[in-house]
Amino acid sequence: MSEENQTLVQRKEKADSLAELGVKLYINSFKPANSAGELLPKGAALQAQEAEPGGSIYSVAGRVMAMRKFGKAAFCTVADSSGQIQVYVKLDILGDVVFETFKKWDIGDIVGVEGSLFKTKVGELSIQAAKIVMISKSLRPLPDKWHGLTDVETRYRQRYVDLIVTPEARDIFRKRVEIIRLVREHLNARNFMEVETPMMQPIPGGATARPFKTHHNALNMDLFLRIAPELYLKRLLVGGFERVFEINRNFRNEGLSTRHNPEFTMLEFYQAYATYTDLIALTEEMIADICMQVNGTMHITYQGTDVDLTPPWTKLSMDEALTQVAGINPAILADGAAVLALAKEKGIKLDDSAGPGKAKTALFELLVEEKLINPTFITSYPTEVSPLARRNDKDPTVTDRFELFITGRELANGFSELNDPRDQLARFEKQIADRGDDEEIHPELDADYIRALEYGMPSAAGEGIGIDRLVMLLTDAPSIRDVILFPHLKPEAGLQTERNEAGEKPAPGKTL
């Protein structure tokens, strides 16, 4: 039996002995009236060894994070979601039975405390416990307080423990909530309406990605977890909602990496009678404002690299980026055959049907993308790789589209929307015809979306922003798994064996 499993067995035996002494291990009757964070300012004016005048009684509940036991007294540190506070436990106040029982409690137990405030000899604000009860017995020990959870995979797999012992993890997720709140406030202030669109769709559209597939029994039809909400949000433009947005989950059946999780959060928003340049301005203003409110500065550090989010941000066409950043001769970019040859020379594999637009995009991803550290909008994406974007009026080989890159990563994708149903139909048909074995392109055309466009969609612009990547940037998180509470992981090996060693048997019908 492993040392961890031995500890689990010992903790369970201790719980049983406490129960035999009459201790209720899991109660639901203690209701704290106060929080640790609320009490700390109350003691600011107190001197060492001074009690709060008036002797007010407070009650808090939280997890025991540290414990020091002496002969007739003990100190423990209790943490709740607002902070932590020290508790002083004395035999002559609680009585022999309660005090001796308390001394058998463990770090990790969740307790409730009632008492008055005072400062110790060393000036630490404490609650002198007049009552202390067990709320929930911890059967597993917390990680060592000096090292925490050092194994990264364990931090992701046991996020509940990570949040207990890693203040930085808690801070990231508090910032995540704040960032999403600020996004909503920014769009609400500009008369955007938040909506919800289907998570399960008969035809996955709005992006190029391999979907997850499921089946609806009652309707006897296959459905797909959405890869993007785009086509449904644009249906709402047709219906007369002129400014809409959605913050919700997308699902893409792809690999795991520091930048990709199969389930992720996206913001998508659409504005009628606007162009992609309007959204560039909105995006720059929104992200810069959020950064200032969350971090108090426009100058941040991401994984050791200084990033300046002060507007205005750099704006380059794809051709300009390939010339200025990658050093490619403009004459090559103007010659389709030369672009294809250069892509081949760089080791880029393209389908036989690929034109210079796909070659340019692949060259950009290979030679330019990771070098765009400070915020940079790349515009004029080839029509060949932009099936939903409006063609540029002056140059139909490119579209009125942009992507935003910061720290070498795509953060946003937006464009003036294609609202010509015949052009859209032709592009869908070409995309399907050129699909080959590409599972990221769905073989069925969304005829209802074409029908919606035939009723008339106003000129509009739309954009998607990866919320997870935005949170990564603003919290200096190296991996997308650091900003998702429960990221996807491979199944954990050995968990059931551990439970059996700790004295638990598998459920009937289950095998190890």
Image (spheres, grey):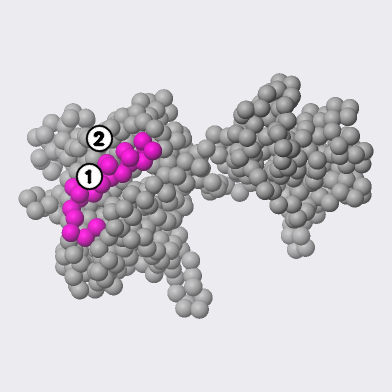
Q: Position of residue 158 (x, y in %)?
A: 63, 43
Q: Position of residue 51 (x, y in %)?
A: 73, 30
Image coordinates of residue 287 in percent, x first then y, are 33, 41
Q: How many marks?
A: 2
Q: Nearer the viewer, residue 178 or 34?
A: 34
Asked where in the image residue 40 lies, by quadrant, the reply is top right
Q: Which residue is mark 1?
A: 281
Q: Which residue is rendered at x = 37% and y = 63% of the image?
A: 195
Question: Which span is picked out in magenta?
Answer: 271-293
Above or below residue 217? Residue 263 is above
Sequence-earlier tag: 2 or 1:
1
Instruction: Determine which residue is flagged by label 2.
Output: 311
Residue drawn at x 22%, y 40% as measured from the top left: 378
Mark 2 → mark 1, Cα distance in angstroms: 10 Å
Relative vertical location of residue 24 with respect to residue 98 in this rendering, above or below: below
Residue 395 in view here: yes
Q: Is residue 289 magenta?
A: yes
463 over 107 or under it: above or below: below
Residue under the point 16% across and 35% down: 320
Image quarter (top left, top right, bottom left or bottom right) of the N terminus: top right
Q: Residues within 10 Å of mark 1 (few under 14, many from 20)?
A: few
Q: In the displayed structure, does residue 53 sit left or right of residue 186?
A: right
- Identify the secondary structure beneath mark 2: loop
Residue type beneath disc 2? Pro
Q: Secondary structure at mark 1?
A: helix
Magenta residue check for 420: no
Disc 1 marks a residue whose amino acid type is Ala
Q: Residue at x 75, y 55 (%)?
A: 29
